[in-house]
Image (spheres, rainbow, N blue to C red):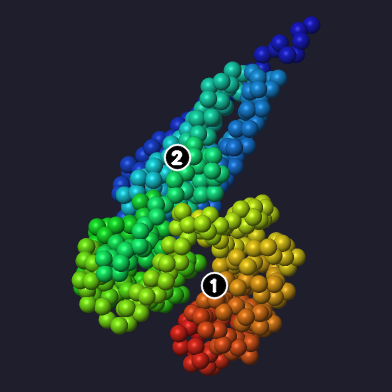
Amino acid sequence: MVEAESIPIRRRRPWFLTFFGLLAVGGLVAMPVLAGKPGAEEMPDIVRFLGHFHPFLLHLPIGVFVLILFQELGATFGKRRAQAGNGSLFPLFFGVASAILAVIAGFLLYHGDGGEYGDNPTAERHLWGGLFFAIAAVLTFIAKAWTLALGANPAAYRLLLFGSVGVMGFASHDGASMTHGSDYLTMYAPAPIRKILGLDGGKPTVPVKAAADQVVYTDIVAPILERRCVSCHKADKSKGKLRMDTYELLVKGGKNGPAIEAGNAAESNIVVRMDLPEDDDEHMPPEGKPDIEDFEVAVIKWWLDSGADPTKKLAEFEVPSEIKQALAKLTSVAAAGAELAPGHPESAKEAGPDDSLKAVVAGLSKEFPGALTFESQESELVTFTAVSLRGKLDDETFGKLGPVLPHLATLDLTATKITDKSVAALASAKQLRVVRLAETGVTDASIDTLLKLTTLESINFYGTKVTAAGVQKLAAMPNLKRLYLWQTTVTPDAVKALKEKMPKCEIVSGS
């Protein structure tokens, strides 16, 4: 009697899958050729709409391919080395399908926004890396289908799989670099790792010049732009095709033309954006980023109106008294930064988050993945957004954030189950600037807590149970610049009365 294992299994050849797989490869190859160069003005809104699903879709193939990779590693080094780790084609099919959808959405995003990242080589590499990954994923799927059908050695399939994951890793890193900055992964790396990567050097200490010897652009204006603008307008992330990290690139401008007009601050694009109401989508810096101070804007406008010369020293300009006051404020900010420059005794302690705070944030990040981050490498302030938690976040869960509340700068609790109890805990959040409580269970009771937070600049009460009597108290908040009262019981008359008391605050009520 012949043993069952010795009987060859005849399986149908996957010609159908091969044909449509190669057809998909052909479509992916042809896509950039047929689409041509990006042009936002020519694209309908549906292109932008579908393209904005790219950040959601891209996580699906990453998760699937990583899982399959571990399965195949287990099969490769396990007892049954001759077989593919998973005899089912469905997981790989799902990964391939999601990869194709993610690439198409990313392509639409790139073209719908008119190539927002301009000539950024990182963006170009990310675009092509994603395309090559999708093609490699399809070929991997075809290879596995034939491996299973023929009962062949899976070496070729596994080689393609490992190669696909490698390409996926490079493409993913480029995407993360554009979104979070090129130093996102290495920002908090331990010293030995930073040394291996050649990142152990700190920023050089810049000697403080006498006021008269300072070059206005280099020593005064450029540092303002560096703090407020360059994070979104630099080599690896040039929003609107605009880079602001050099004078020449400011003059060159982006898709909306030159960023500055020498001798005319009012017509300079960067000033126009800074002067827009803060609830305007075009206002810069965008919501969630530290807003530029009035005295900083005043200095930039003065420099532009004075000719925007990139080489003149302060002594060569006529400086009005109000600009002298603004420069004095800038000097105090610079002095505080200089005290914490590399080499200063306190710099290791205060130039960024200390080790204990990093450990707390790292621990909470496991509890709230993707929700809690530092504002920057140099800041001990953190942001928390519950966009991925929503209904899972209640008062009890929110209580776990107690250790980081004093370091909160931005807090987004939209559509969560939190109530006034959670807001009461914010009494310790003395550095909070932005709080979003839209569609939560908060009431007027929360307003009494928020009144104690004098740093608050933006509050969102959309869809909550706050009343006219409660929001009238907010007139006592000195720094409040933006207030959302849409879909509340606050009447138009109450909003009008509040606007009279708070003329510098933008109140959005939907009426």
Q: Quadrant of the N terminus?
A: top right
Residue 439 horizontal/vertical position (percent): 63, 73
User: Between 360 and 335, which is closer to the camera in this rendering?
Assistant: 335
At numbered mark 1, what does the secondary structure look like: helix, strand or loop?
loop
User: Between 385 and 152, which is closer to the camera in this rendering?
Assistant: 385
Identify residue for label 1: 433
Q: Is residue 4 above or below residue 405?
A: above
In which image quadrant can residue 437 be found?
Answer: bottom right
Neighbour class for label 1 at 10 Å: few (<14), some, many (≥20)? Answer: many
Q: Is residue 491 above or below residue 24?
A: below
Please give the name of the residue rendered at 61% of the width and 34% of the height, measured from the top-left corner.
68
Is residue 490 among what the camera can see? Answer: no
Label ID, residue 198: 2
Image check: 292 left or right of 65? left
User: What amino acid does circle 2 point to?
Assistant: Gly
At numbered mark 2, what does the secondary structure look like: helix, strand or loop?
loop
User: What amino acid does circle 1 point to?
Assistant: Arg
Label 1 vs label 2, nearer the camera = 2
Please give the name of the residue rendered at 70% of the width and 75% of the height, measured from the top-left corner.
424
Label ID, residue 98: none
User: Between 404 and 38, which is closer to the camera in this rendering?
Assistant: 404
Residue 107 horizontal/vertical position (percent): 41, 48
Q: Is residue 152 above or below residue 46?
A: above
Please give the name of the residue rendered at 60% of the width and 73% of the height, measured from the top-left corner.
430
